[in-house]
Image: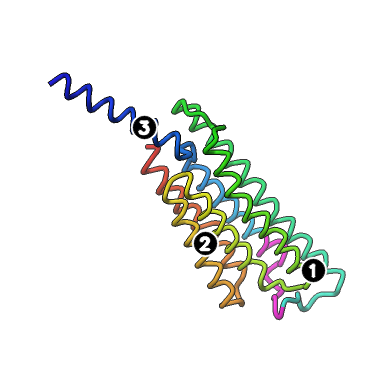
């Protein structure tokens, strides 16, 4: 009986070692919740403070504003999105590092490096594409592009971590496509994709893997 128990324990240890060598397991659900809350705050700031609920985006142009006001508002919207991105990434690294220390996992491994490369390649390509959209004043396509390229990045990185990341990526891509079809509410899709989806994903991951 003891031999069978030891054999079962050995199999569990081997399985754990194989998972840790092939997948990045330090990703925390709390990072998803934090990123979602930051995105919601960014969306609220964009709607109530920057846009002030009075302007509309039609045909890629901010209307009812002077050229100077329009340029200032565009700059503030870009700054808002970049702030959300930087804070979300910082939170992701912090909570993942904290989880790795708690579970005695190594954060910086060949697997985590491959995951980051696969994550950032689509993000960098998407960043350059969004710059092209900005230069062409194609504002209505910026939010769909953000969501689609971010989704592609998650799908790409999902091969090296939890399967849920892959499915989150698919959901982000679908949200981006819908934002491209229904272009009247880009901020709504942005808030849903980067805010609510992240919170839902984070809660699910936390309850499944960290409680």
Q: Nearer the viewer, residue 196 or 180?
A: 180
Residue depicted at 42% across the width and 42% down the height: 206
Quote the CA–CA distance across marks 3 and 2.
30 Å
Which callout, 1 or 3, points to the residue nearer the camera? 3
Element type where label 1 sits in the image: helix
Q: Which residue is mark 1?
A: 135
Mark closer to the chain start, 1 or 3: 3
Element type where label 3 sits in the image: helix
> Is 136 placed left or right of 181 in the picture?
right
| Image x and y of residue 5, in percent | 19, 24
Q: Which residue is mark 2?
A: 172
Q: Nearer the viewer, residue 58 or 144?
A: 144
| Image x and y of residue 197, in percent | 49, 57
Query: Mark 3 near mark 2, Cβ–Cβ under 8 Å?
Result: no
Q: Nearer the viewer, residue 120 or 186?
A: 120
Q: Looking at the rendered structure, which numbered label has been put on residue 16?
A: 3
Magenta segment, which residues?
46-59
Mark 1 surroundings: few (<14), some (14-19) or many (≥20) residues within 10 A: few
Which callout, 3 or 2, points to the residue nearer the camera? 3
Quote the CA–CA distance across marks 1 and 3.
49 Å
| Image x and y of residue 210, in percent | 40, 37
The C terminus sits in image quarter: top left
């Amino acid at each position: 009986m003891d031999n069978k128990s030891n054999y079962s324990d050995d199999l569990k240890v081997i399985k754990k070692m194989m998972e840790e060598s092939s997948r990045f397991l330090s990703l925390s659900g709390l990072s998803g919740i934090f990123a979602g809350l930051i995105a919601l705050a960014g969306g609220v700031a964009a709607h109530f403070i920057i846009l002030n609920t009075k302007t509309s985006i039609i045909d890629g142009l901010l209307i009812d504003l002077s050229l100077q006001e329009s340029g200032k508002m565009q700059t503030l919207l870009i700054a808002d999105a970049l702030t959300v991105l930087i804070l979300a990434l910082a939170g992701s690294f912090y909570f993942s590092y904290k989880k790795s220390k708690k579970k005695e996992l190594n954060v910086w491994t060949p697997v985590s490096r491959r995951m980051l490369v696969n994550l950032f390649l689509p993000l960098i390509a998407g960043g350059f594409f969004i710059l092209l959209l900005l230069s062409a004043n194609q504002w209505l396509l910026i939010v769909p592009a953000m969501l689609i390229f971010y989704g592609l990045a998650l799908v790409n990185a999902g091969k090296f971590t939890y399967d849920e990341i892959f499915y989150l990526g698919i959901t982000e891509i679908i949200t981006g496509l819908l934002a491209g079809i229904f272009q009247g509410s880009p901020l709504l899709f942005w808030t849903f994709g980067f805010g609510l989806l992240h919170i839902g994903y984070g809660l699910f991951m936390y309850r499944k893997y960290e409680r």
